Amino acid sequence: MALEMLNVSKTILKKISGDSCYLNFGWSILNYTLLIELKSHYHKSQLNSATINTYIKVIKGVAKESWRQKLIATDDYLHIKEMKRVKGL
């Protein structure tokens, strides 16, 4: 499971920044708008809703840790936390 989450994280980072290395990513750009854009992109790519929901779950976890480390604002974290799951098609 941990390896799967790592691979998912790399996929998401590659989409956002073009680089899959978490050390090179500017975590402060993580916000609700970015998550909406990613969700829309993956939905248009016709990914399975379970896959999109896994991606959302990973981003929420990363956002929580980014908030704990004071890399993102509380408002950004709370908005990301409230992101709804994609319903199955």
Image: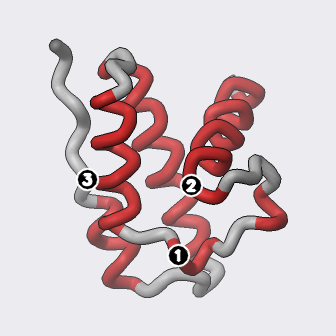
Name which residue lies at 27% across and 69% down: 79
Q: Percent from the top left, x then y, of residue 33?
A: 31, 66
Image quadrant containing the N terminus:
top right
Q: Which residue is mark 1?
A: 29
Other residues around mark 3 within 10 Å, as few (<14) / some (14–19) / many (≥20): some
Q: Which residue is mark 3?
A: 83
Q: Nearer the viewer, mark 3 or mark 2?
A: 2
Residue type at mark 2 is Ile
Q: Nearer the viewer, mark 1 or mark 2?
A: 2
Q: Nearer the viewer, mark 1 or mark 3?
A: 1
Name which residue lies at 58% across and 46% down: 15
Tell me whether the residue at label 1 lies in contact with that at label 2, contact meaning CB atoms closer than 8 angstroms.
yes
Does dot 1 land on a helix, a strand or a loop?
helix
Name which residue lies at 45% across and 54% down: 60
Q: Percent from the top left, x then y, of residue 73?
A: 44, 86
Does dot 2 land on a helix, a strand or a loop?
helix
Distance, label 1 to label 3, CA atoms, is 17 Å
Q: Nearer the viewer, residue 5 or 24?
A: 24
> Is 13 left, or right, of 24 in this rendering?
left
Q: Which label's residue is closer to the chain start, 1 or 3?
A: 1
Q: Which residue is mark 2?
A: 16
Other residues around mark 2 within 10 Å, as few (<14) / some (14–19) / many (≥20): some
Image quadrant containing the C terminus:
top left
Tell me whether the residue at label 1 lies in contact with that at label 3, contact meaning CB atoms closer than 8 angstroms.
no
Is residue 43 placed above or below 65 in the rendered structure? above
Tell me whether the residue at label 3 lies in contact with that at label 2, contact meaning CB atoms closer than 8 angstroms.
no
Distance, label 3 to label 2, CA atoms, is 18 Å
Residue type at mark 1 is Ile
Q: Which label's residue is closer to the chain start, 3 or 2?
A: 2
> Is 86 left, or right, of 50 in this rendering?
left
